[in-house]
Image: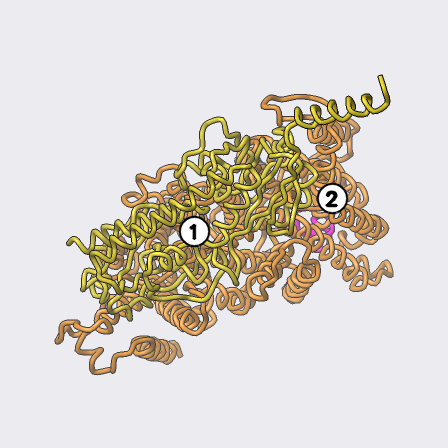
Amino acid sequence: MSLTSVRQLIAVVGMALLLAQPANAEITIEDSLGSQTFQDTPKRVVALNWALIEQALELDVIPVGASNPEAYNTWVAQPLAPKEVANIGTRAEPNLEKIAALKPDVILAGDRQRDLVDSLSTIAPVVLLENYSPDSSAGDNAIRHFRTLAKLFDKEALGESRLDSLQQHIAALKGQLQQHYGDTLPEVLPVRFGSDTSVYLYTEHSMSNWVLEQLGLPNARLLPYAAWGVTQKRLETLKDLEQAYVLYILPYPEEEDLKQSFLWKAMPFVRQNHVNSVDPVWSYGGAMSLKYMADVYVKSLLEIADQ
Amino acid sequence: MIHFRSLSLAGITTLALAAALMLGTDLSVPQQWHLILQRTAPESFADYSYFYGHLPRLIMAIIVGGTLGFVGSLMQQLTQNPLTSPLTLGTSSGAWLALIIMNVWFTQWVAQYSAIAAMAGALSAFMLIVAIVGLKNLSGLPIVVAGMVVNILLGAIATGIILLNEQYAQNIFMWGAGDLAQNGWDQITWLLPKLVLFIPLMLFAPRALALLKLGKDGASSRGLAVIPVFFILMISGIWLASAAITSVGVIGFIGLISPNIARAWEARTPRQELTFSVAIGAILLLLTDRLAFFATQWSDQLIPSGITAALIGAPALIWFSRRQLKAQDSLALILPSGRRHLSPLSLGAISSMLLIAIMAYGFIDLSQGNWQWHWPSAYQWQIRWPRLLTAAATGLGLAVAGVILQRLIYNPLASPDILGVSAGATLAMVASAVWLGQTSLTYNWLAAIAGSLVVLVCLLLLARKHQYTPSSLILTGIAITALIDAVIQFCLAQGTSDSYRILLWLSGSTYRTSAEQSVTLTTGVLLLLGVALICSRWLNVISIGRAFALARGINVSGVSLVLLLIVALMCAMATATMGPVAFVGLIAPHLAIMLGATSGRAQLCIAALIGTTLMLWADWLGQTILYPDQVAAGTLVSIIGGGYFIALLLISRLKRS
């Protein structure tokens, strides 16, 4: 065999070997810590907070482990976490040994878990995805993180189609609202009761406010950002809301008592019947939770319009 | 004289009421009167807000304040002790725990049965306290100490449950913070019928109290059935207090300080003290509630009434009750005495307990779903050793601090937690986190040291003035511990996940300690132990008596200062690294004595050994029992330690009777 044919042979074999191996595409993503490169698509995923369990599940990735998946199924519930997701402890103190035993390829950490990154990164690469910040909308951040995860899990097509349907869904909801309320939509204020005399309001950059913005609903009381996009106020501070619609998110065990309260009945928005309850919804979720939140807000507003 | 004081009290009450009526509403005075007399029906929102928000809130403040003042006075006269009150007898901690349990496990009953649960909780906590001190021993300080132990224990259990079930407890955080804001008259119409007992009590209690003042023998010789009367009055008081607390939430201090102010105002007869306390309690709560109202308007945060009541109440308590501390307040809490000499057997037993704890901590692996016994992997070891070291060093440090305090202050109950030294460090750290925006709670050493030093100095100033009587010592402890509870509740009522961060730290967890922190803590604690051992000869001499020590040529104040500095540093370092840890400083020194470690040096060493063992067991169990969830070592040690202490008191009581 001549030298050239040997060379040709080596080249051919080499080509064949290269082709036989899976395409060694490096994945580079941006998270809250900067950019990170993965050699392969991670298969075994551990999610340390509920927004991230939801994001992964919406990308058809079932985490091998997650923080308190049973409680997640009670409080978030959309989408449900299957039974095979192992519990790795609480969100505040995830069990490091348990995580290590699951041999994850990647660990997804979220808000208020930055201080865990050092100890977690000795187990597996950590992707830190923080939603809440004083200068950017949590909704936008959740969507950005959803894209980041789609890229990481090699599900970019699925991710984009889900995001498209989110946009279309919200546009359709907005159309429904305009049918009932006209082109200029009324001011709205979603609240959650803390007690019979205090409410939690969602601030600037909260998930809830993103939903209002996208639906074209002006926020009746836009408060400056507070941690987690939520702040507590006296119920009485809502007395100035003349035209606005107030939506209170369930569950609220004392709802019946509230309806009997004279003070509540004297609120301008109650007098005008600009008030309704909202089905339980998780306000601190990932990108697809925005859809569920928009659904229940609009459902509640349409119920008022139909009365 | 008393006539003049009654008149002036009535005057102040009227003024306070009038001021409170007018403050915080947009309506003019004539408009207000028209509404109150119902000449005009409410129309505008301001009208409704006045009639269904402002007015009921004022009335609620008066009713609740008056009730708490009355119950406080009743209890203090019954027990002849200026420190008993619904707060110190477990009423609020019992109700709090009951409501937490209800909201976590029996959600479907929350709307209907919350009030019953809270009352049942309050009454059970009181029963537990009575069981501890015994029926015949309900007067004096033991009941206060037992109350504190029960408060710490129940509080720790509640915190543990909240931390493991974050979402569920949110509904009652506002209640926990003590909020008087009203949403109509419903609460008042619910509460008033439950307070009818007040009328017969006001009529008949003063006679019984006057007889009881003569002492048990004197009273029974005049035909008073002491124990039944005592019990009926006490249970009625608890009933009233728990009804009030159930409707507005945890509001401490009012019941504790009102009778003290009444006595400082020279209320002499039982009837005078009761009436004065009712008026003072009502005024106090009215004013603190207005303060909370305006603080909420001025600041961006919602400030519940419970926090202002505590912020004013804590210093007021120390100020008004300091003069009433009596030297003869004996503790009468007799703990079982132990052997004379340290036997090798018991030493071996503790050492092997320590060894087993270390082995379990190091070699048991649960991460595969079952119990496995093997050499830890490099990674597991890297997670475990800083936690192990932190737990051990904290146990050692607090035990040594406890020994020094007990010997220096001549009191078997003088421990960093009962005296509030650790609590001072905790309070300083939480306050700096909440109000100065400190992001990280751990490792804020400066605040911790400042906090525990301030408490120690207060303690010493008070104690020296009152010849180191137990009551003067426990006073600061009660005030600061209750203040911390109020601050915790305030944080929780903010309702964001950051509140859980603070709560998590308050539960005393080793989870977040880094390798460097644990090494620094251990080095510091061991150095201080060295200094303490060098000082142990002085400790021996001082614990015989100050005069004796002076006669032996010891610079008592200098030595005391060094020793107290050790205590403050130990508590501050332990608290700053892993958060507050209760009971170790109380139990370890006592167990050491029981095992026969009578000399200062022996007690220091054995207590250190016991403290270390206890903390290691608590931390390991906390990481194991609910695996993969974790219970903080501080929570578990409170449960183990509190349980042990209660058992100890029960046993020694049963032995005596």
Disc 1 to disc 2, C-alpha distance? 33 Å
Host chain of mark 1: B
What's under tag 2, amino acid-wise?
Ala
In terms of image quadrants, where is residue B25? bottom left
Q: Does the magenta stretch include residue A265?
A: no
Q: Camera-side residue: B262 or A70?
A: A70
B263 lies left or right of A115: left
**Element type at mark 2:** helix
B624 lies left or right of B3: right
x then y, percent, for residue B118: 36, 46
Q: Can residue B157 be seen in this view?
A: no
B137 lies left or right of B29: right
Q: Is residue B416 above or below residue B311?
A: above
Task: Indicate which label's residue lies in the foreground, 1 or 2.
Answer: 2
| Residue highlighted by disc 2 | B393
Residue at 19%, 56% (x, y): give it: A305
Residue at 71%, 27% (x, y): give it: A15
Residue at 47%, 47% (x, y): give it: B138
What's under tag 1, amino acid-wise?
Ser
The chain painted orange is: B
**Element type at mark 1:** helix
| Residue highlighted by disc 1 | B92
Which is nearer the N-term, disc 1 or disc 2?
A: 1
The chain painted yellow is: A
